[in-house]
């Protein structure tokens, strides 16, 4: 199985939870889909040419392949060349995760003055690693705000002291500005510097050597398919979206659970067939079918150890559904209660939404719980006969009384009338005090208002006297 493609690689090394499931004829191996589906659930690892912007390139590909939606894995400046992952139709659901993936670049920096040696530049390049402050360059079409970006690794490849040009390689976080990095290199060396040329050599899991194609290749492949009905070139240019997810941990689901997940159902443990080693809590994982198709991206709520020991519960929370709905048949609503409900709707004993009407028998109204209604849910939680509830409360009282006997002497069930009268007196006193306080507060307010009006009158009189003098 080490030779199996995409997400089925090393399938036999996955932990088996259960092998009991019914294979369904729906779905297909990602590499053997029909050509229309293959293109609409694929991506292109494009070698971006030098002058057009990333958005222009993506728009041209949309027009060449005659598809509705395309997206890319992170903008490249017009003059920058290299790896641009163009996602088509269904694969655009993975664009966000590709944009936030790490990137690798090879760039040329021009220094404004000569430096002592190549070793000095190599040291400066290695110094600028880790978390760095960056403000986007003036040319960038974003808000020029100070931000922190991480450079994982960088090294100097070559330096030409005559032309003062240095070639360097950088592995960095998404959103790093290499132009700003070159300016910082110049400042660090004290001679000034600028970026001369740049090429992206890796974006996420895909690099230059991973089936990279040019715009001409895409155009020629589509022409071959349109004119000669030869789809082999198109299959070579477009890759299935599952290739972008090969670095994720996998969870294999039963065929009967696939469509429910596409409709947003929780990923429950009884639907899991196999799971990978090393799944951690809150880790992003990919949920796949037995044929190797990606169903969705999810966030793990159980570790590998917990999955192996539990027999029920929620394994993961859906982050992004990738598969189209109804690719697999619906397999929910086939239980005894659901079947009975469908029969009653047909006979008119329930309305078309499955809710009770005037013909509904009383037995159904008493027994059936609609879990969509929260008030009925609570009622269902306490859906026990009155006699049982009474028994439970009696047991509780008995246990409490036994506990009290063990700790303190028995106290009378009701306090004597003298104590009651004392409590009532205390209550009355409190109420009286509250009333008095409120009245006194009102009087104070009245007094304050009176004094303030008197002061105002005196002021007016003084002003009148001064004016008359």
Image (cartoon, grey):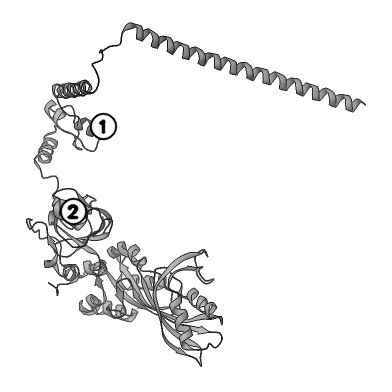
Counting from the top left corner in percent of width and height, residue 12 is at 11, 67
Circle 1 or circle 2, nearest the eye: 2
How far across and how far down the image is residue 20, in percent? 6, 55
Q: Quadrant of residue 408?
A: top left
Front residue of 332/172: it is 172
Looking at the image, is 231 positioned above or below residue 467?
below
Q: Residue furthest right?
A: 469
- Is residue 273 visible from the viewing direction of this image? yes
Q: Position of residue 337 (x, y in %)?
A: 11, 38
Q: Can you identify the residue that label 1 sits on?
A: 375
Q: Nearer the viewer, residue 336 or 396?
A: 396
Q: Is residue 397 above or below residue 285?
A: above
Name the residue nearer the viewer: 269 or 90. Answer: 269
Can residue 170 be seen here?
A: no
Marker disc for residue 169:
none
Alpha carbons under labels 1 and 2: distance apart: 33 Å
User: Crowdedness of circle 2 by 10 Å Cα count: few (<14), some, many (20+)?
Assistant: few
Report the quarter where the N terminus lies.
bottom left
Question: Does 435 sit above or below residue 95?
Answer: above
Label 2: which residue? Answer: 306
Task: Tell me which numbered mark, 1 or 2, is placed earlier along the sequence.
Answer: 2
In the rendered picture of this protein, how many numbered marks are placed on residues?
Answer: 2
Dot 1 alpha-carbon crowd within 10 angstroms: few under 14, some 14 to 19, many 20 or more: few
> In the rendered view, would you say 442 is above or below 222?
above
Where disc 1 sits, the SS reads helix
- For image coordinates 14% across by 36% down, the residue present is 345
């Amino acid at each position: 199985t080490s030779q199996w493609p995409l997400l089925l690689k090393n399938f036999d090394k996955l932990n088996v939870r259960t092998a009991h499931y019914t294979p369904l004829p729906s779905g297909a191996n990602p590499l053997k889909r029909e050509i229309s589906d293959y293109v609409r659930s694929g991506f292109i690892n494009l070698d971006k040419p030098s002058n057009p912007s990333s958005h222009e390139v993506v728009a041209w590909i949309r027009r060449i392949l005659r598809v509705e939606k395309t997206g890319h894995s992170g903008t490249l400046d017009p003059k920058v060349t290299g790896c641009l992952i163009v996602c088509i139709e269904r694969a655009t659901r993975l664009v966000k995760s590709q944009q936030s993936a790490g990137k690798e670049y090879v760039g040329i920096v021009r220094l404004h003055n000569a430096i002592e040696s190549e070793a000095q530049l190599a040291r400066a390049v290695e110094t600028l690693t880790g978390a760095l402050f960056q403000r986007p360059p003036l040319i960038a079409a974003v808000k020029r705000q100070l931000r922190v970006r991480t450079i994982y690794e960088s090294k100097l490849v070559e330096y030409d002291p005559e032309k003062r040009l240095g070639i360097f390689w950088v592995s960095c976080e998404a959103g790093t500005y290499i132009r700003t990095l070159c300016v910082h290199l110049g400042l660090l060396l004290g001679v000034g510097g600028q970026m001369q040329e740049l090429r992206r050599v890796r974006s996420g899991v895909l690099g230059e050597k991973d089936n990279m194609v040019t715009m001409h290749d895409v155009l020629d492949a589509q022409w071959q398919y349109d004119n000669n009905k030869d789809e082999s070139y198109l299959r070579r240019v477009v890759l299935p979206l599952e290739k972008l997810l090969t670095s994720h941990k996998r969870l294999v689901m039963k065929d009967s659970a696939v469509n429910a997940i596409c409709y947003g159902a929780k990923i429950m443990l009884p639907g899991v067939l196999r799971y990978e080693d090393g799944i951690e809590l809150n880790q992003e994982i990919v949920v796949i079918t037995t044929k190797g198709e990606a169903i969705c991206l999810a966030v793990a709520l159980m570790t590998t150890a917990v999955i192996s020991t539990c027999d029920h519960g929620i394994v993961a929370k859906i982050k992004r559904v990738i598969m189209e709905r109804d690719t697999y048949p619906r397999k929910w609503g086939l239980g005894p209660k659901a079947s009975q409900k469908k029969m009653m709707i047909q006979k008119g004993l329930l309305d078309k939404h499955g809710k009770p009407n005037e013909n509904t028998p009383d037995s159904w109204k008493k027994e059936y719980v609609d879990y969509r209604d929260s008030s009925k849910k609570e009622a269902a939680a306490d859906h026990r006969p009155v006699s049982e509830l009474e028994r439970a409360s009696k047991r509780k009282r008995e246990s409490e009384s036994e506990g009290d006997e063990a700790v303190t002497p028995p106290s009378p069930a009701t306090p004597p009338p003298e104590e009651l009268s004392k409590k009532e007196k205390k209550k009355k006193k409190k109420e009286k005090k509250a009333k008095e306080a409120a009245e006194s507060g009102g009087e104070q307010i009245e007094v304050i208002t009176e004094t303030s009006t008197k002061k105002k009158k005196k002021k007016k009189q003084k002003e009148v006297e001064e004016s008359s003098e």
